[in-house]
Image (cartoon, rainbow, N blue to C red):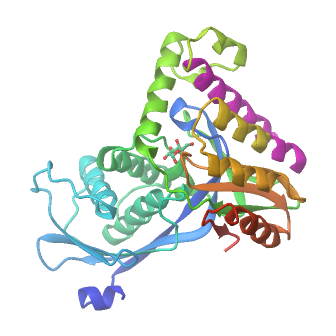
Amino acid sequence: MDFQQIFNAAPTVQSSAPGRVNLLGEHTDYNDGFVLPTAIPQETTVYLGLSPNNQHHLYSAELEEWVDITDSNMDSSLKPQGFASYVVGCIRMLEQVGHSIPPVNIFITSAVPIGSGLSSSAALEVATLRGLRSLLHLDLDDVKIAQLGQQAEIQYAGVNCGIMDQMASSLADPQHLLFLDTRTLERQKIPLPQDTEVVVIDSGIPRQLATSGYNQRRAECEEAARLLQVKALRDVTDPETVETLPEPLRRRARHVVTEDNRVLEARQGVSAERFGELMNDSHASLRDDYEVSVTGLDQLVELLQKTPDVLGARLTGAGFGGACVALVTAGRGEAIAHEVLENYNKLGYSGHILVPE
Ligand code: GLA
């Protein structure tokens, strides 16, 4: 199926945006902290044209799902669900900042895996906003697109997320790491450590409780910052400072403070070995202090970490299931991914390789 077959007309514009994988800096973005993601090769593409009537028409090729949306006079309590929520969220956010959006036809196709922690939703938001920018000649820069995508996610998908995923999808490329200060939005593209490449394996474990667990962690961090009398945990640099907090806030805050320090160290340009150690430390911190790992992710990370030529490995994204990322010696990614996956799936899981493609 393509746009022509669905809408009986040719699309006017097309736009794409990638998913992302985060190498370091997990659960730091909503604490005003630091992150180090990169774009993955898989992208979401949207094709757009004006709608011939007074409704938006959305079609998802992967889901084979069709949704019709009545324009802004729609009762806002009738929020759409599923993929349409992200698209409609983007349209509504543009309207909120003063753009007038006529009814549109949108055809969506995506190679970004859904539910693996690789930000398929951010890729959809950024691709949609880019498509509307070019269809309607809107004056929006790439940072504004990321900010509107984040607001769509918060207000229409109910995840009280930070800005990392949308900034990565809007500004990163697969050849670099994107260092981002999520408070100031200062950013810098830095190379991967010398002679390394990235491997991403989906654990095959669905992200259960991800939304409620995520929102709960965020609330715990805000409470910890309040008790420490700082604006956000980003303002704490010495991990000793958190020792006075009651549990579990002490461990939650310790993860955030040490994770920020790991990103800042990596940004300085460390050796591949040191970068790998920082990733391993990040996983231990996410597992023990932040408690967002699950048994299968720990098993997959362990298998990766004990494989020769793997420099470091950790869960990536929000956790509670989803994917793991490893930094490996350049040229060895494919062989390592197959070897580890075979051993992992022998444990009864149905994981699969996402990067290299
Ligand atoms: C999700 C959110 C991001 C970030 C990560 C955890 O991907 O959308 O904003 O908080 O989890 O690092």
> Which secondary structure is most common in the magenta stretch?
helix
- Please give the name of the residue rendered at 56% of the width and 34% of the height, measured from the top-left corner: 184
Pick the quarter of the image with the N terminus: bottom left
Magenta segment, which residues?
Answer: 249-277
Rendering coords of residue 74 (x, y %): 11, 56
42 vs 267, nearest the viewer: 42
* Residue shown at 56% from the left, 46% from the top: 319
Give the residue displayed 44% in from the left and 27% down from the top: 219
Q: Nearer the viewer, residue 114 or 166?
A: 114
Q: Is residue 197 left or right of residue 152?
A: right
Instruction: Locate residue 185 relative to residue 270 in the image: left or right.
Output: left
- Residue that extends furthest to the top in the rendered view of this protein: 244
Residue 328 % position (x, y) = 83, 59
Question: Measuring 47% from the left and 64% from the top, which residue is drawn there?
Answer: 114
Q: Is residue 105 visible?
A: no
Pick the front one: 62 or 175: 62
Q: Is residue 272 magenta?
A: yes
Image vertical order of residue 316 relative to residue 5, above or below: above
Q: Is residue 54 above or below residue 291?
A: below
Residue 243 magenta: no
In this orientation, which residue lies closer to the viewer: 352 or 16?
352
**In this picture, residue 2 sits left or right of residue 323:** left
| Residue 74 visible, this angle | yes
> Quick check: 279 above or below 80?
above
Residue 303 position, x and y percent, is 78, 55
Find residue 139 and report its horizontal and vertical position in percent: 38, 57
